[in-house]
Image: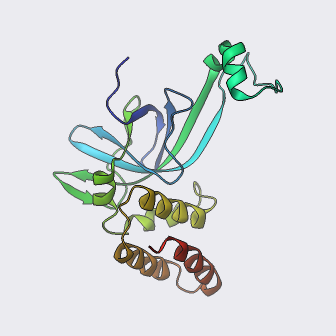
């Protein structure tokens, strides 16, 4: 089957705040901290990958240790890979409508069976032009167990995609300071870790 470029899977369950997606190829996934989106009825719904789980999704099949390298298993027992599946947990952090980006909850859940697409550098740059999306990330304790790690992953991913500038990093850091006001020790450690991404 031919899928759109950079489209890696589809939504299987969804709420206003988050969604779960199944990847079509268990080895082709969106990285932790990456930006993905779903297009639906003129809206582009944005989310950040905050968790991934790989395994067997069949009641009558389980993954067992075989003592072989992955490439050996693929050659000698290719059938076991037919049951492997990767699920992505995605936090919804905004949407675009009529070319305007809104950093708030989406007006409706991402559609079940909607295609999940990994944002290209241009889309990533546009969405992260302002750090307002961090507010939704930090206000989702029910989903995000390690928000500081996810912030670092977001910054790392932007740098890998070559859309992170020193100015953007400074603005992001200032935004984090405002959101974490009152927790100096946490801010100090996080700021120190963010410095590794300064170009």
Q: Nearer the viewer, residue 12 or 150?
A: 150
The answer to which quarter of the image holds residue 129 is bottom left
Q: Looking at the image, is 113 positioned above or below residue 38?
A: above
Q: Position of residue 174 (x, y in %)?
A: 43, 81
* Labels in figure, total: 0
Q: Position of residue 19 (x, y in %)?
A: 48, 42
Q: Position of residue 162 (x, y in %)?
A: 37, 59
Q: Nearer the viewer, residue 40 or 119?
A: 119
The answer to which quarter of the image holds residue 82 is top right
Q: Is residue 124 left or right of residue 100?
A: right
Q: Quadrant of the N terminus?
A: top left
Image coloring type: rainbow
Q: Position of residue 77 (x, y in %)?
A: 71, 14
Q: Is residue 182 left or right of residue 160?
A: right
Q: Nearer the viewer, residue 183 or 170?
A: 170
Q: Nearer the viewer, residue 124 or 88?
A: 124
The answer to which quarter of the image holds residue 168 is bottom left
Q: Quadrant of the C terminus?
A: bottom left
Q: Looking at the image, is 71 positioned above or below residue 51?
A: above
Residue at the location (59% across, 43% down)? 52
Residue at the location (29% across, 39% down)? 39
Q: Looking at the image, is 137 positioned above or below residue 168?
A: above
Residue at the location (32% across, 69% down)? 130
């Amino acid at each position: 089957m031919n899928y759109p470029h950079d489209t890696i899977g589809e939504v299987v369950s969804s709420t206003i705040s988050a969604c779960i997606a199944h990847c079509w190829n268990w080895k082709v996934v969106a990285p932790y901290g990456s930006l993905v989106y779903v297009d639906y009825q003129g809206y582009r719904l944005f989310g950040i990958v905050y968790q991934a789980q790989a395994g067997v999704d069949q009641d009558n099949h389980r993954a067992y240790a075989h003592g072989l390298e992955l490439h050996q298993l693929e050659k000698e027992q290719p059938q076991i890979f037919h049951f492997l599946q990767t699920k992505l947990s995605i936090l919804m952090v905004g949407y675009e409508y009529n070319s305007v980006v809104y950093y708030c909850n989406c007006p409706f859940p991402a559609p079940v069976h909607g295609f999940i697409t990994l944002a290209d550098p241009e889309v990533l740059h546009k969405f992260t032009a302002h750090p307002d999306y961090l507010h939704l990330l930090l206000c989702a304790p029910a989903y995000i167990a390690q928000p500081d790690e996810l912030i670092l992953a977001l910054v790392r991913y932007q740098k890998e995609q070559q859309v992170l500038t020193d100015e953007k990093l400074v603005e992001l850091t200032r935004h984090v300071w405002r959101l974490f006001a009152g927790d100096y020790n946490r801010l100090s450690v996080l700021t120190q870790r963010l410095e590794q991404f300064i170009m």
